[in-house]
Amino acid sequence: MKKNFLAYGLVPALALGTYGTVGAQPLAAVNVMSEQGGTGQAAVAAEPVTQESLQTLHKELEQQLYQAQELQKRLNAQLGSLEKRMTKVEKKTNEPRVDIHGYGRFRWDKQHFTDFKGTNRKSVWLNLFVNHRINERWSFHSEHEFEDSLSTNHGAYEPDGGFDALGGKKYSRPVLQLYADGRVGDVNVKLGRYYLQSPYKFTFDEKIDGWQASYGIPTRWGRKANFTLNSGNTYSKVFYGDTENKLDIWAEGGSGNVRVLSLIGEIPVAKNTNINTHYGRITRRNDNLRRKTFSLGFDTKLNRDLKFWAALAKSDSNSLNKSHVLQLQYKEARADIPGSFDIYVKKYLQRGHTGMTNWFNDDIVDPTHGDYKEELKQQNPDAPDKPWQYRAGEFNGIRIGADFVPVRNTKLLVNYTFGKQGLFDAGQGKLTGKRNHYSFFRTQWEVYF
């Protein structure tokens, strides 16, 4: 029995030990076991290990190793195929071909002017987003916005009578965005009607019908430097009161026949600091009247919880052509983190012709423009023309605000804005020199789904 164990142990050892050694001589003999038919007893014959027998054994071992490697390759291929199928199933589950989500807003706004009554408006908004994944590279998106005034029970789109119609508007928002986006090589592309926002929404914040191409360059900070080119058509009021506007300098309504060119750069320059630039050009097709704007700003994290923004902008208009903004924010309110909050203070000088489309951002009200025009007339029946004396050309003031997430997927926003509105003479294309007090208070409850 010991000889049998010795045989099984020495044969592989000698095969491995003599592999590759040309002319090696056997140092010992091993017993080879064979069975005698039907007797149950083993006959053991002593045979010397020769070079030929070791080579034969080596070839057999190589053949077995090759077969094992081939089997492992087939198993790996099957596992890879299974993993791909599981990934597709997970993607269909986690990223459905059609996805619908949105948010609702319950809003209360109150404005105060120096010598006439402001608005006290309650409204409800609903924004729905529909995303359709066409394939691995391309998707189709739409946004639908619906508004109803709880103060007057007027919807945003009734009647469809134009700018001067009671309760109506000149523009439409049921289809706020409708575009396709995808990749062409390393370039991200967007086509259709979409919102174009310059950095900090400072010089451009409006939807356009056109295209966008964006390209990212990796940086040492782990974030890409992105450069985005936009071109398209938009609705704009930027030429109101412009001295070079020869068509109708008094027309407070804008034009929808305006071409936009926009180049945005967002560049990380340090671990927690980004520089943002925007060059914009807007051209009215009717008479080729053109305005150019440029903005430069940065945002940085001063520490874990404190963030600071600063930006300035300038246009090539003859007047009202400079603006700036400074903002300091503590913490960050995130709808997916219950209990999160932020507090911020913003100081800004916003002038009419710096913005390419909107007179003011942050919902600051020019009484002669926008959603509140008719309501201001109704609020002041004894002086219906009083709001017309408040053609605003600039606002210089401060906003203090706070956001809080009481439960997941909700947010409460409160802010108060106060400062001076510089009144504007459209015929002269300049400020009158009169600056009246203006304040604006907003409370808003948002629910995400």
Image (cartoon, rainbow, N blue to C red):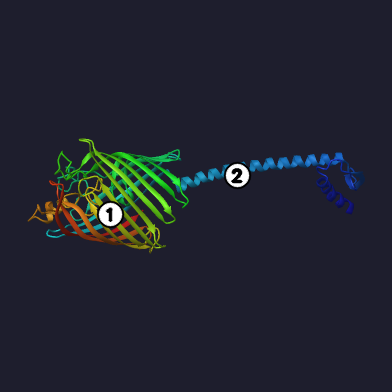
Position of residue 79 measured from the top left corner of the image (x, y, whole percent): 60, 44
Q: Is residue 59 left or right of residue 332?
A: right
Question: Residue at coordinates 34% horizontally, 48% vertically from top-left?
Answer: 277
Position of residue 399 measured from the top left corner of the image (x, y, whole percent): 26, 60
Element under disc 2: helix
With respect to residue 314, does 53 lie above or below?
Answer: above
Element under disc 1: strand
Q: Quadrant of residue 72?
A: top right
Along the viewing direction, whichever of 276 and 92 lies nearer the viewer: 276
* Residue 429: numbered disc: none
Q: Quadrant of residue 209?
A: top left
Q: Looking at the picture, which amino acid does disc 1 mark?
A: His
Q: Is residue 14 visible?
A: yes
Name the residue that disc number 2 marks: 79
Name the residue that disc number 1 marks: 324
> Residue reaching furthest left?
382
Q: Is residue 365 visible?
A: no
Question: Residue at coordinates 16% horizontally, 49% vertically from top-left?
Answer: 430
Position of residue 138 measured from the top left corner of the image (x, y, whole percent): 42, 39
Contact flag, marks 1 and 2 (Cβ < 8 Å):
no
Question: Dot 2: within a 10 Å radius of its alpha carbon, few (fewer than 14), some, or many (20 or more) residues?
Answer: few
